[in-house]
Amino acid sequence: MRVNIPEALSLGMLHDLSALAGRERLSFSEVRRLEWEIEGGVAFTPQWLESCPAYPRMFWRSRSGASQTLACGVAASGPLAMLLEMLKSADPGVRIFGGQRFDAGFASSEEWSRFPSTYYFIPKAEIIHSGGRARLVVNLVPGSLDLDDISEWIASIGGEMPLPRRSVLMRWDQPNFEDWSASVDSSLKAFEAHDMSKVVLARKSCLELNEPLGPFALAGIIMSSSPACFHFCIQPTPDSGAFLGASPELLYRRVGERLESEAVAGTRPRSLDAVEDARLEAQLLQMSKERLEHRLVVDALEGTFEKLCSLSSSDDVPGVLKLSRVQHLRTAFQGTLHEGIDDATILKAFHPTPATCGSPTKAAFEFLAHHEGFDRGWYAGPVGFISQDEAEFAVAIRSMHWRGRQLDVFAGAGIVYGSDAEREWMELEDKISGVLNLLVP
């Protein structure tokens, strides 16, 4: 079936879908997936979600850029285990979207109190752009057959809202540099006492904007400046705020029984000068501090793949992942899953990694609870999607919590023996510089 947006997606057509679903007498566990191809050459943009009256709203773009999705409304939501059970009898292609806090067991601060600790859902509607074609998908389950909100959204799609003039009125960091330096010093003492070998300290840079900028409009702006990343934005409710980012790091990808992941750790800045950029890359590959930080992540992933997979392999030596502002050491892993391993098990095995927490994980978690000084929320947690045939999750770094005129931008740095507080602070600046440059006129 072929349709044009917005003209042919009429209220009558979507009401017909509700009637169809009612006649199907679906059992509770079934999810029906109905799909239409979109014609008309409308430019795909995450900003379309700004006009959607249905919640949750979520934008997802794969790191390759080959697929991007606008998802909205709830066909089903709840614990991941329940949704995975529903997926077993759902139509092929039905996907679960969502994610969770870095530490789902940690009590939320006031800033994150309206944002769920863990949130997974099967959307009521998706617009998917993949392989050079665009599709409208509607997921139907008993008890979720009212599509008036989706009809209203589809009818409004067409032009884009003008973006406000962007500027930052005020910025403050939590922790400030003095407190950050104290935490780095405490980390180094813990290494000397053999309590830890690595900890990832994060910082929250709080920005007050001159006027509100919608989260999905902001996601579109960020996406245009950082193409080689996963892009995501999730807004569970009208008053929850939104969580968005441009992450370079894959947590895991599953295609059938094939499992992929990567160690991304160790950082140097980029330079517009090719000679200087090559010198910085050589530093990254040779510096003992960067190689130690990366090695700890590689060792942890080797253990995870041994536990989950019957066969596994990894790169013999790390390569370099080059982004617009920074470059990282990267080692790729792949394997074949043991029979019966589901995505809930995979998520639990991978999150968190030493790349976002530290090593050993338990000791690093306890250290962060006493020394980091703020609530990470969903920063560095898993975010992505699951279907019967595949799953893909990013590590939600290079991310931010949107709350109208306030934007909390997160970044972290791996601290190991030999780290210097001032240099690690400047690494945080390198990591958020792309967002700051987009917001400062």
Image (cartoon, rainbow, N blue to C red):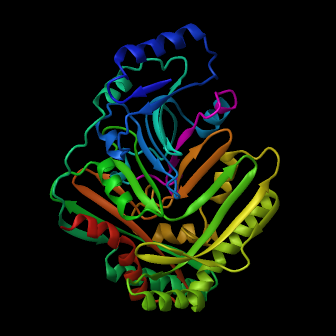
Vertical comparison of 405 with 322: above or below: above
Front-most of 437 and 13?
13
Q: Does the magenta stretch include residue 106?
A: yes
What residue is rendered at 49% in x and 92% in y? 279
Left or right for 185, reference 152? right
Quadrant of the image occupied by residue 302: bottom right
Quadrant of the image occupied by residue 412: bottom left
- The picture places residue 258, in percent across and down from the top left corner, at 74, 53
What residue is rendered at 31% in x and 57% in y? 221
Left or right for 128, reference 162? right
Residue 308 in view: no
Quadrant of the image occupied by residue 142: top right
Q: Does the magenta stretch include residue 23?
A: no
Magenta segment, prevailing SS (helix, strand or loop): loop
Left or right for 97, reference 291? left
- The picture places residue 146, in percent across and down from the top left corner, at 42, 18
Span colored in magenta: 87-108
Vertical comparison of 104 with 3: above or below: below
Q: How many labels does the image show?
A: 0
Vertical comparison of 267 with 349: above or below: below
| Outermost top residue | 23
Front-most of 403 and 138?
138
- The picture places residue 348, in percent across and down from the top left corner, at 65, 53
